[in-house]
Amino acid sequence: MPSTIPVAPASCDEVDPGTLSVEQARQHIEALITPVKDTVTLNLTQALNQVLAEPVASPINVPPHRNSAMDGYALRAADLPQQGTVALTVIGTVFAGQPFAGSVGPGECVRIMTGATVPDGADTIVMQEHVQRSADSLTLGTGHCQGQHVRHPGEDIATGQTVLQQGKRLRAAELGLLASLGIPRITVRRQLKVAYFSTGDELQSVGEPLGAGQIYDSNRYILYGMLKDLGVELIDLGVIRDDRAAIEAAFLAAAEQADAIITSGGVSVGEADYVKTTLDKLGQVNFWKIAMKPGKPLAFGRVNDALFFGLPGNPVSVLATFYLLVKPALQRLAGQDAVTPVVVRLPCAESLKKRPGRTDFQRGIMANDANGNLVVRSVGMQASHILSGMSRANCFIILPRESGDVTAGSLVEVMPFEGLMS
Ligand code: AMP
Ligand code: MG
């Protein structure tokens, strides 16, 4: 028994020299990642959210043919009047997708729709608003330029040009781009498999009544949503009780099936935290204190061949640590190029409480004020179990480690969520 009772620090966030900054944690994690190598060739729709394994060169010119950018008339620049007006004969009409069979001679023109192939002989388009038409005769004046309103083959993308680099995650825009080039199948890195489970004797699954002292397991649903957005294959291992044997069995099962394992809970210094003891036995795992709020404790390392992330138990900490540390790591593991999150400086519309010691990732709402200027404010309560605030948030307000309270009107760093919630 110590002869004196330990004194609590004035602030539980006081600077602890043993903690890592978020950036240091990110670098340590990055150093341990080897991206998956295997590739698969998939139909475009199956490749959504997967990572390109090789660069893609265009097999065609875009646009593929010379076409009109306007509704109007296709004619020869040599017929454009230097002064006064000129009359041309309309010899036909050309619609998009239906090329004109003939060619445009001197003194002639063809009515043309946007996107239609410019007929042979013609090299210039005059907008329909700039002409006078009567029967088969067209009258136009000066002010037109040779070659105007003509889109040339390959002007957007030339045959052989690289349009996407390897390491690119394929989203809606990329699928559209690949389809526009007529590419039906694409080679991507194989999909990551991620196993996840929650730990805690107090956790009840949704659909069951809550017993005394129980809470619902929300973390598995948070992880489901965030992992789904990342395009990984999900392996849900459920809720694991705070029981040494059950946790060990869950880890071994997870490591067998998955490239990465994510757990929540059991990484702090609580008495039933068997995650730590199990990992000490099974893997090479570091237990970090990260100078971030929410989300101080984090376990990271390997269990057999699988990468392991042990997230804190509080749901907001799960969201924050996933977003800031796990997501970039899984993106790298999947072979995606590193993504640098955008951070903007915005005036804070209200004062914020902050204790020096950790970097705060407060949940905020960016919105236009009455003058149309973008400002940020807090969602309100910032404790790490307040999921309702997280659900209203569209950004993190990042307050540096050493900073104290923020006064209303000062500039703060804001990281908008991308696809997390909005
Ligand atoms: P722990 O790190 O296991 O001590 O958990 C820290 C806090 O998070 C406790 O209040 C837990 O009840 C809570 N918690 C842990 N896991 C979950 C979960 N899956 N869903 C909701 N809350 C959780
Ligand atoms: Mg627990």
Image (spheres, rainbow, N blue to C red):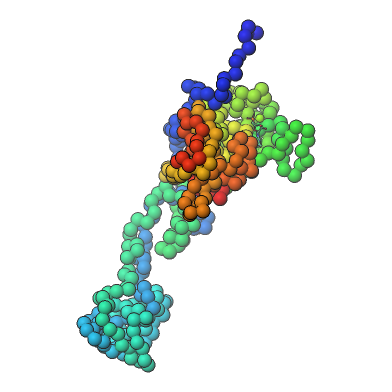
Which residue is pictured at 34% across the width and 81% down the height?
130
Which residue is pictured at 37% across the width and 81% down the height?
128
Horizontal placement of 214 versus 290: left or right?
Answer: right
Total count of labels: 0
Which residue is pictured at 22% across the width and 84% down the height?
83
Frontmost residue, 171 versus 232: 171
Residue 272: where, in percent of width, then height?
67, 25
The residue furthest top is 3
Tell me if residue 78 comes above or below residue 188 in the rendering: below
Q: Is residue 409 visible?
A: yes
Frontmost residue, 7 versus 273: 7
Tell me if residue 83 comes above or below residue 164 in the rendering: below
Quadrant location of the N terminus in the rendered image = top right
Frontmost residue, 60 versus 9: 9
Q: Is residue 257 visible?
A: no
Horizontal placement of 60 versus 210: left or right?
Answer: left
Residue 375: where, in percent of width, then height?
49, 47
Residue 367: where, in percent of width, then height?
52, 50
Tell me if residue 383 comes above or below residue 274 in the rendering: below
The residue furthest left is 82
Which residue is pictured at 38% across the width and 85% down the height?
93
Q: Quadrant of residue 4?
A: top right
Residue 334: where, in percent of width, then height?
48, 43
Q: Quadrant of residue 224?
A: top right
The residue furthest bottom is 135
Horizontal placement of 349 versus 54: left or right?
Answer: right
Quadrant containing ligand 2: top right
